[in-house]
Image (spheres, rainbow, N blue to C red):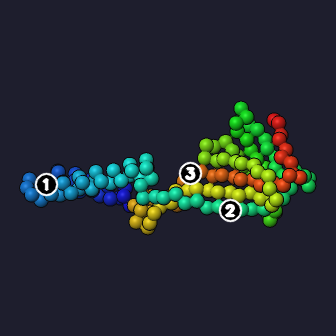
Amino acid sequence: MIIVLLILATFVFAGAMIFARAGRTRVLTTLISGLIIAGGLGALILNDNYHWGMHQVTQTQIQDLAPLQSKRAALRVQQLGTGSERVIAYRVASATKASRTVAATTTTTTTKLTTGAPAQVQIRTTTWQFKNHWARVLFSLGNTKTKVVARQYLFTIPKTWQVLTVRS
């Protein structure tokens, strides 16, 4: 919406400068359209750099874990590249698929392993969301996907389960 407003204000500004006669109407039209252009560009810059009109929302999802292949294997960790990157394979108890993977290679994704009674994974995802409908109309540009700020996987596994490390 703000892009459309900028385009219209630019056409009005150019049209007033080219076709309007010198006088109060021309000055007022160019002043108002120039302020709309400057304000719109400033709002776009603030939204892009400082997430103006947005706030962070954190959602937490807890899923029960099931052993991967044997009764004792809870997680499979495979190191990638230099060792600071890894892929963690796990299986959710209610899922029909064999495993899910977490690629802990990005700076926004963190994983933590703890020992505890229920075998579960807690996935905490923090995303940027628009504060209100007006901010969504102005800045969304048809993009409905939200930007992920951080994602944390907290694995809680019993002491009887093992974490298998696969060397490549």
Which is in the foreground here, disc 1 or disc 2?
2
Numbered label attached to residue 27: 1
133 to the left or right of 11: right
Asked whether, in this view, residue 47 is left or right of residue 23, the answer is: right
What's the residue at 77%, 59% (across, down)? 120
Residue under circle 2? 61
Report which residue position mark 3 lands on.
Answer: 149
The three-letter amino acid code for the residue at tag 1 is: Val
Q: Which residue is drawn at 63% across and 43% down?
A: 106
Tell me the kind of residue under disc 2. Gln
Residue 85 is left or right of residue 150, and the answer is right
**Crowdedness near tag 3: few (<14), some (14–19) or many (≥20) residues, C-alpha within 10 Å:** some
Rendered image: mark on residue 167: none
Residue at the top extreme, as displayed: 82
Q: Which of marks 1 and 3 is in front?
A: 3
From the top left corner, tell me how far across and down residue 117 is, in percent.
Answer: 82, 59
